[in-house]
Image (cartoon, helix red, strand yellow):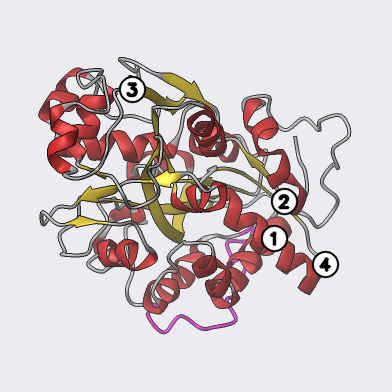
Amino acid sequence: MFKPFALALGALLLLTACSDKGAATAEGADAPAAGDITGAGSTFFAPLGAKWAETYKDTTGVRLNYQSIGSGGGVRQIKVKTVDFGATDKPVKPADLDESGLLQFPIVMGGIVPIVNLPDVKTGQINLTGPLIADIYMGKVKRWDDPAIAALNPGLKLPHLPITVVHRADGSGTTFLFSNYLAKVSPTWKEEVGAADALEWPVGLGGKGNEGVSAFVKQTLGSIGYVEFAVAARTGTAVANMRNHDGHMIAPSIDAFAAAAAGADWANAPGNQLLLLDQPGANAWPITATVFIVMHKKQDKPASARAALTFFDWAYTHGDPLATKMHYVPLPAEVKQMMRAQWTRIVGADGQPVYAPAAPAAAASATSGQ
């Protein structure tokens, strides 16, 4: 199912619901045309990717056709070469990259946040911790006026409502990061539930994609969910504060996501595999995420790979204002240069790089993994 990215966002739930139906063109949808770029994967990336694609098409006339099907689906589709790139919030392990002949690089960062639907509670008015969220998602804390929640929120009127847990129904990089964070801060969660992109959830309702979880929470009084911050900001769902690694209760923000990413050591991350969870720092948001682009290193269609890398180079150069406006965190300039240097490993049948970045890689000596 391919649709121009600028149009696909409005049909995000439909696209997500059809996640594993491969690359067949949906009835009424536009098929990719020659010269279009095709991609699939992360719903986290979808809102920003749509805006980038809209601007890029206005500038170059080139369309990006993207299936917002979740990170797992994106990795599966790039492995079978039905798209030019996959996008995932769950980094592919170096061994898996090697086995499949893939290269991954970060494109942008952001945050995953808890959202709630409670009477008269707005964004920033309720405080939660990671271990408490784990207990809620295990069904151990069942009502909003539970003493454990009340102790974190003196003065806040908490209703005697049952808590309705909302989680992802599909395989998801967002769930991978959320559950990995809970496993880091809650030994009970780690032992009883674990961390993966798809889980056997102890309690709760499942929604398709970030948009589906947000929709369930907005419709259900007394509910809690987790979504990408840009989705929460766009839908107006109330967002909770969280206690971070250093013990500070903070609100999610671009600055808080950037603080978590400040110490990221990309140069020494094999295969660019790096998680930004429970990072130290007074202002660091505890569940900070990175979107990775995955491509084949040896290209059967070098022109398509060149078009995709040209788009990502444009995004690195011109995409930061849109990313910031939508509550994502752009990569530092030195990290972008490092990744541009790695793009020379993507080659055609002749062994030559398919793309030469316009901005030479000043940091070419800084490499990672592959």
Answer with mark 1 or mark 4, whichever residue precedes in sequence. Answer: 1
Residue placed under numbered mark 4 in the picture? 61
- Residue drawn at (25%, 26%), measured in percent from left and top? 136
> Bounds of the magenta span?
348-364
Q: Who's the residue at 27% across and 67% down the image? A: 259
Q: Which comes sooner in the sequence, label 3 or label 1?
A: 1
Q: Earlier in the sequence, mark 2 or mark 3?
A: 2
Question: What residue is drawn where x is 64% and y is 26%?
Answer: 17
Q: Nearer the viewer, mark 1 or mark 4?
A: 1
Residue 157 badge: none
- What residue is rendered at 77% in x and 58% in y? 63
In the rendered structure, does residue 188 fall within the stretch colored magenta? no
Q: Which mark is residue 53?
A: 1
- How many numbered marks, from 0 up? 4
Whichever of labels 2 and 1 marks the residue nearer the N terminus, that label is 2
What's the CA distance linking mark 4 and mark 3?
52 Å
Verify CB contact (< 8 Å) between mark 2 and mark 1: yes
Q: Residue 5 got which mark?
A: 2
- Pick the front one: 82 or 274: 274
- Residue picked out by circle 3: 161
Compare residues 164 and 245 and report the one nearer the observer.
Answer: 164
Mark yes or no: residue 96 visible: yes
Task: Verify whether residue 354 appears in magenta.
Answer: yes
Crowd around label 4: few <14 · some 14–19 · many ≥20 (10 Å)? few
